[in-house]
Amino acid sequence: MQILVMSDTHGDSNVIEKVRSFYPNADAFIHCGDSELPFSHKALDGMKKVRGNCDIDKAFPNEEVFDLADITVFVTHGHLFNVKTSILSLSYRAKEVNAQIACFGHSHILGAEMIDDVLFLNPGSLLKPRGRIEKSFALVETKDTYFEVKFFTDDNSPISTHKFMRK
């Protein structure tokens, strides 16, 4: 199963559509907030999407929790959990909703790590990355025994791949 994850596109609907076109058959599309688009914008159709600190449309929820097969996915922007300081608050919420994957943005810094059997994933930013030059998004492939996280540039060039064992 494939999950396409992006965040912090800050008004650029073209990059959302471009990245989606690379993986049109993904099983889920996630935007972790700060799209700065209306909730009903066509670029966000069919996506699980949340409200970031720069999103003004109140139709965006602060979080989404959904199941894909046997995996529970938690999505939030991160500003309400102070993710720029620590992911401790985020990890408490992920545990509360029994998530196996927690997706967030806000910091514009890509990263993935497994903590207490939860994959924490920040896809970085497709507009203003921090900590690196490349604008980025992530593709998560779920396998029976592991998650594989692949980070790509906005032109779909590979940045890195990481495997995390799962229970």
Image (cartoon, rainbow, N blue to C red):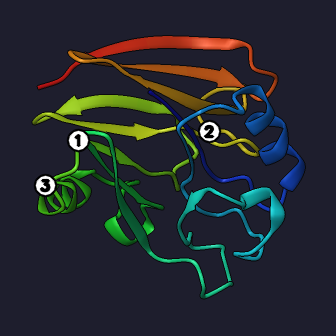
Which circle, 2 or 3, is nearer the viewer?
A: 3
Instruction: Look at label 1 and name its amino acid.
Output: Gln
* In the foreground, 3 or 70: 70
Q: Is residue 32 above or below residue 153?
A: below
Characterize the local packing of mark 2: few (<14), some (14-19) or many (20 or more) Cα atoms within 10 angstroms.
some
Q: Residue at x 84, y 37 (%)?
A: 18
Instruction: Look at label 3 and name its amino acid.
Output: Lys
Label 2, label 3: how many angstroms apart (C-alpha)? 28 Å
Q: Earlier in the sequence, mark 3 or mark 1?
A: 3
Query: Which element carries disc 2, helix, strand or loop?
Result: loop
* In the foreground, 114 or 108: 114
The answer to which quarter of the image holds residue 133 is: top right
Q: Residue at x 53, y 67 (%)?
A: 50
Left or right relative to 82: residue 92: left
Label 1, label 2: how many angstroms apart (C-alpha)? 26 Å
- Place of residue 86 in the rendered image (x, y in percent of width and height, measured from the top left): 28, 51
Task: Identify the mark at residue 100; answer none if there is no mark.
Answer: 1
Task: Identify the mark at residue 95; answer none if there is no mark.
Answer: 3
Instruction: Give the residue number, with chain letter if any, for mark 2.
Output: 130
Q: Earlier in the sequence, mark 2 or mark 3?
A: 3
In what quadrant of the picture does the C terminus appear? Answer: top left
